[in-house]
Image (cartoon, rainbow, N blue to C red):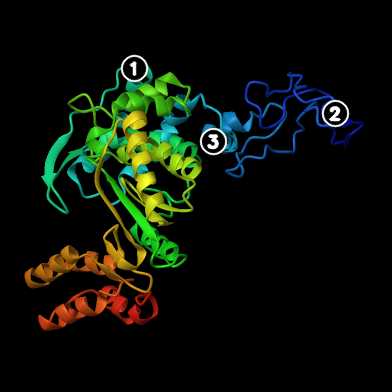
């Protein structure tokens, strides 16, 4: 505003929404959405100098008609909503819109291509990246999207399994879903469930198991249980009910269930990114039953293998029976292998034979290592060294390498694992 040749900075006397609102943003909106006791009534105009508190910094947009943050950056609004959901244990809606924006599909593509840039499927998708992303966006929102048939193959380590490999475009959609729902469900998991979680892994679960063993007298017992053909026997009806406990957006649940389907009435495909999360969700009721109903103090689970440590023989037998009943009635599963033994005899769990003072890799891993050294398979050698690096099996591995003159042929990083064994390996 100019008065007699002088410039005066003034705030326009107009009411308007605050920076963070979407539908109530704008200079002509009276936004009185707070309680009377709250002094912030969100009333007032936006001047020509101030800017919205956008998480991405300078948006280049100023003035009274500057849009809200949710209009400038939908992804930022979605992430803020996700943070609110983490604090709210109730069911969540509007997930479909968050998951299948162009921005989130692009982020899903970035996640999906990690360590896969050289594969033909990734290259073919990248050649027409934006047309492919726009086509996925259109198909999902129109209800026409269906995953392409899986590519199936067999693996035999450690036992025979059928792997269902999704096409890259379907992997992009899975990552887009995963980015939205992981935090919602992760908040419901107990800390002692280690598989396929951020900060988890076999090393973490092995160390935790050994820590718990050290809390008890060696003459107390543990009970170790394993679910029979877990992935192939997941009841998809039960799985959908578990989804709907946290997700009230039916369209989102429908798309999630597309990646649980396979031939037969039960089971979910091994090989999907989402199958790992689905497995966590499916056995989460079992975790809470063991911790809350059975009052197990020391309990740990990795996928479908779980151990209760530090109980008497009678308690171990009672817990095993009640767990069998729970699995059969609630989750329609049954046990495969189970062991009840004294702690001092060690626990064979997640690839390690563990005692209070030390642990070793399983004999099968030692055999595989010896065979890989003879065949000169460096990738297998390095992988098994990484598996064994915190165990008392490292001297045996080094002896095998030196016997065949292969120690100097492995990468320097793998050689350093043997140097640190004296510090970390004798646990």
Work out whether mark 2 precedes mark 3 in sequence or the reverse, and give the earlier one. 2
Residue at disc 3, secondary structure: helix
Graded by Cα atoms within 10 Å as few (under 14), some (14 to 19) or many (20 or more), the crowding at tag 2 reads few
Q: Give me the C-alpha separation between circle 2 and circle 3.
A: 28 Å
Horizontal side, residue 322 vs residue 409: left or right: right
For the view shown, which residue lies furthest in the right direction?
A: 4
Q: Position of residue 106 (x, y in %)?
A: 39, 37
C-alpha distance separating marks 1 and 2:
46 Å
Mark 2: which secondary structure? loop
Does 330 sit above or below residue 406? above
**Which quadrant does the C terminus fall into?**
bottom left
Q: Quadrant of the N terminus?
A: top right
Return the x and y of residue 105 as percentages of the image width and height: 39, 34
Of the two numbered discs 1 and 2 on the same chain, state the one appearing first in sequence: 2
Residue behind mark 1: 143
Work out which residue is located at the far front of the displayed protein and give it.
Answer: 314
Which residue in the structure is indicated by mark 2? 37
């Amino acid at each position: 505003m100019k008065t007699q040749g002088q410039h005066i900075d003034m705030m326009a006397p107009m009411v308007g929404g605050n920076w963070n609102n979407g539908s109530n943003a704008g200079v002509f909106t009276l936004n009185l959405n707070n309680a009377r006791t709250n002094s912030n009534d969100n009333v007032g105009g936006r001047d020509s100098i101030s800017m919205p508190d956008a998480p991405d910094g300078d948006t280049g947009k100023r003035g009274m008609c500057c849009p809200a943050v949710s209009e400038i950056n939908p992804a930022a609004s979605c992430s803020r909503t996700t943070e609110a959901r983490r604090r709210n244990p109730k069911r969540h809606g509007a997930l479909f819109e968050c998951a299948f924006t162009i921005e989130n599909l692009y982020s899903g593509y970035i996640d999906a291509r990690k360590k896969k840039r050289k594969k033909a499927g990734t290259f073919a998708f990248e050649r027409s990246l934006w047309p492919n992303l726009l086509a996925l966006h259109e198909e999902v929102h129109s209800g026409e999207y269906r995953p392409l048939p899986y590519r199936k193959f067999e693996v035999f380590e450690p036992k025979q399994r059928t792997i269902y490999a999704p096409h890259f475009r379907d992997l992009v959609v899975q990552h887009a879903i995963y980015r939205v729902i992981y935090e919602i469900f992760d908040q419901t998991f107990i800390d002692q469930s280690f598989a396929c979680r951020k900060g988890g892994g076999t090393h973490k679960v092995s160390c935790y198991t050994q820590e718990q063993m050290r809390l008890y007298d060696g003459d107390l017992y543990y009970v170790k249980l394993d679910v029979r053909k877990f992935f192939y026997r997941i009841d998809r009806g039960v799985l959908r009910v578990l989804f709907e406990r946290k997700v009230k957006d039916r369209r989102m649940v429908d798309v999630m269930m597309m990646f649980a389907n396979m031939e037969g009435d039960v089971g979910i495909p091994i090989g999907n990114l989402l199958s790992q999360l689905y497995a966590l969700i499916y056995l989460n009721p079992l975790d809470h039953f063991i911790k809350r109903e059975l009052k197990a103090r020391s309990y740990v689970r990795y996928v479908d293998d779980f151990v209760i440590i530090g109980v008497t023989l009678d308690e171990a037998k009672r817990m095993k029976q009640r767990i069998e009943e729970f699995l059969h009635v609630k989750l329609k599963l049954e046990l495969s292998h189970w062991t009840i033994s004294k702690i001092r005899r060690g626990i064979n769990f997640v690839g390690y034979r563990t005692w209070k003072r030390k642990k070793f890799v399983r004999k099968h891993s030692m055999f595989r290592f010896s065979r890989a050294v003879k065949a000169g398979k460096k990738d297998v050698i390095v992988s098994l060294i990484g598996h064994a690096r915190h165990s008392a099996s490292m001297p045996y591995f080094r002896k095998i390498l030196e016997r065949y003159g292969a120690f100097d042929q492995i990468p320097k990083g793998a050689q350093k694992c043997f140097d640190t064994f004296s510090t970390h390996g004798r646990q």
